[in-house]
Structure formats: structure tokens, C-alpha cells
Amino acid sequence: MAILVAAAVATGGARAAELQTLEIATKSGVQVFSVEVATTEDEKRTGLMYRKELPDGRGMLFDFSPEQEVSMWMKNTFIPLDMIFIRADGRILRIAENTVPQSTKIIPSRGLAKGVLEVIAGTAKKYGIAPGDRVAHPLFNGH
């Protein structure tokens, strides 16, 4: 299993491309997020590292195509995050809530994931996002 750093672009560095829309269909309705997409190895390695804030409704989507076991960590990440592991079919596999800033503890997908959405900690609980919910974004089949 490759260890990929979860976190994104150093201050002053180039950020991932333009924001894209990602939607999550929950039991309480559809939640819409504006996400940066990390596709290159450098973008995935850097993730949200060194950032001091992440507004509600914003996030970073990591593209791990093809679907695979994924491991993340919080080294050099200063803000707590929820990590949402997403299968190729767009269904949420697992959510790691309130990850610990600066931790080198490995956070595994515990199954095959094609993408990981990182959002500010508390987002999953706030919006009722749960495993099995469907994510709509071009990265996932049928969306």
C-alpha cells in the first residue's frame, strides 16, 4: 500500500486547478461542495498541507484511479478534517471523522476507493453524510 499524503498545496505554491462542483445525496437532501481536484502525484502528496483554513462547503477531491486501497495521513496538515473515502460507483465507503492535525497515524480506506474527499472536520456530522450515500462528480461512474 502506498502511503499518500493527505493534505494540499504549500502556502505560495500553485493550487490545484479550478474549483469543481461535487454533490452528495444524503438522507436529508443533497449537499453541494466546491472542490479542488488533486490528480497529479505532487498534488496528491501535498493535499491540504500547510493551509490554515478550509471554508465550509469547500474541499479537496483526490483521484486515486483506478480503484485501490488508499492510505492517508495528516502530517503537515494544520486543520482537522473529515476524510470521505468513495468507491468507483460513487458510493461512500468510509468516513474518517475529525482527523488529528499533524498526526502521522495512517488512515486507511478499509476497502477499495477511487476517490477521497477532504472537508473541514464536522462536515459529515453536520450534514448527515454517511457510508452508502452517493457522490455525484465526473470522477465516479455515471456522473
Image (cartoon, rainbow, N blue to C red):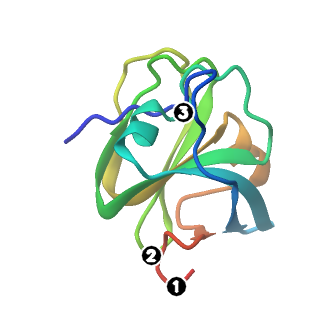
* Whether label 2 touches label 1, CB < 8 Å: yes
Q: Nearer the viewer, mark 3 or mark 1?
A: 3
- Measured from the top left, where is residue 87 in percent x and y? 42, 65
Is residue 39 placed above or below 55 in the rendered structure?
below
Identify residue for label 3.
8
**Residue in the image at 49% along x and 69% along y:** 139
Say if residue 124 shows up in the picture.
Answer: yes
Name the residue type under label 2: Asp
Asked if the residue at tag 2 contacts the one at tag 3, i.e. Cβ–Cβ closer than 8 Å, the answer is no
- Label 1 Cα neighbours within 10 Å, binned few <14 / some 14-19 / many ≥20: few
Where is the N terminus found, in terms of image quarters? top left
Q: Quadrant of residue 34?
A: bottom right
Q: Is residue 37 above or below residue 123?
A: below
Q: Element at badge 3?
A: loop
Distance Cα–Cα, label 3 vs label 2: 25 Å
The first of marks 3 and 2 along the sequence is 3
Vertical placement of residue 29 versus 117, above or below: below
Residue 89 badge: 2
Using a 10 Å C-alpha cutoff, classify the residue at mark 3 as few (fewer than 14 neighbours), some (14 to 19) or many (20 or more): many
Q: Which one is nearer the viewer's eye here, 6 or 127?
A: 6
Residue 42 drawn at (x, y percent): 39, 37
Residue 27 vs 99, above or below: the answer is below
Residue 113, picture quadrant: bottom left
Give me the C-alpha separation between circle 3 and circle 1: 27 Å
Say which residue label 1 marks: 142
